[in-house]
Amino acid sequence: MIYYIVSAGIAFILSALISMKVISQKNNKNQEVLSMQTYILGTVIQLRATGKKSKVAIDKAIKRLYEIDDKMSVFKNNSDISKINKSAGIRPEKVSEDTYYVIKKAIQYAHLSQGAFEPTIRPLVKLYNFGNEGTRIPSKEEINKALKLVNYKDVIINDENKSIMLRNKDQSLDLGAIAKGYAADEVKRIFEGYGIKSAIIDLGGNIYALGKKADNTSWNIGIQNPLGSTGQYLGVLGVSNKSVVTSGNYERYFEEDGKRYHHIINPKTGYPCENGIISTTIISDYSIDGDGLTTCGYVMGLKYGFKLIENTRGVDAIFITSDRKVYVTSGIRDKFTLTNKEYLLQEYSLEEYYEKEVV
Ligand code: AMP
Ligand code: MG
């Protein structure tokens, strides 16, 4: 039964006519399952919750998602991030607790990955115009100029008054690789506050699977086939109370002369990351960590990235390479089923990728 359909204001226009859809259904235990779809944080949001208070929980979650977008979007003039970017090289800007927390986490992942995760990547991303109309290949000169501005060590954090400053003029932050993870954690927190025990929180492929399905079995999360069309999965992962986040070269890209230019940039070269990886998925308790680590893993590649995750407690990963190999960390091997026979489940071998890696 269609519950109601309303337009979602400005997001409606920006999202190429995706309206807010809310659908109410009964599951096989006669419980009401509320699903809604809309467009926030530059992506399609799908929330699905079972519980008496699912309507109010979803409403509050949507409000919170707009709030996070208002604070962290690079496209909104008054966001904390835009303020920091405009004041680069001039003065520190006091920011909200939310933005402060996410920036701290971003810097943590920049350190962990030795700059593969790079929160000051914006000058490069902007050159390609990702996230806007009119994407293009920048010139070598433009890339070299932008590269000089990219350095997470230039993010000056004042813990006492929660202010942030970028050391040099024209430097610019971009939380696109981590903010959705934080947002998913916030939706989960809100859902739990309203007693929701079973839900799927999907922020454009950044998923949190809360509790279990009505039949008390784990959620089955499809892992996108990076070489297939949207919604075509290459395998299934059974999870409960876990975040499942994927970074892929198919999420945002354009093609010119048969070459794909995607949105995950190698901060050392200034060009889209090309190290044989076409998608990384991270399974973790917190989605902010999953989101941070997917980007780390993608840029670091198999040799360094996969090893990093294998050696990190409580976190697992699925790495997929362009030669159709699927690498799964030991913690989730029994939970992942490869369904697409064009791919090969591969044991990780250090030697094989030694020559190929570019970080
Ligand atoms: P994700 O899909 O989580 O890997 O995030 C990709 C988004 O993060 C891009 O659309 C850019 O806005 C930004 N980004 C691109 N390259 C990097 C990088 N090396 N480190 C951090 N953020 C990046
Ligand atoms: Mg990420």
Image: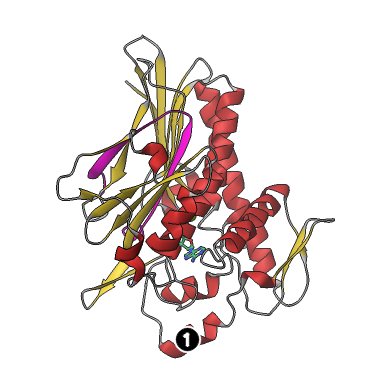
- Quarter of the N terminus within the rendering: top left
Specify whether 37 is left or right of 254: right
In percent of the image, x 41 and y 47: which residue is there? 317
Q: Is residue 249 magenta?
A: yes
Residue 260, horizontal then vertical, whole percent = 28, 70
Mark 1: give few (<14), some (14-19) or many (20+) Cα within 10 Å: some
Residue 227, horizontal then vertical, whole percent = 22, 56
Q: Within the image, what quadrant is residue 92 found in?
A: bottom right
Q: Is residue 160 magenta?
A: no
SS assignment at label 1: helix
Q: Nearer the viewer, residue 124 or 234?
A: 234
Q: Is residue 313 above or below residue 359?
A: above
Q: Within the image, what quadrant is residue 258 found in?
A: bottom left
Q: Is residue 69 above or below residue 189?
A: below
Q: Within the image, what quadrant is residue 137 found in?
A: bottom left
Q: Which residue is mark 1?
A: 142
Cβ of disc 1 within 8 Å of ligand 1? no
- Quarter of the C terminus within the rendering: bottom left
Q: Is residue 32 above or below residue 193?
A: above
Highlighted magenta segment, given as a residue range: 230-252
The answer to whether residue 10 of the structure is visible from this angle is no
In percent of the image, x 54 and y 31: which residue is there? 59
The figure's colour scheme reads secondary structure
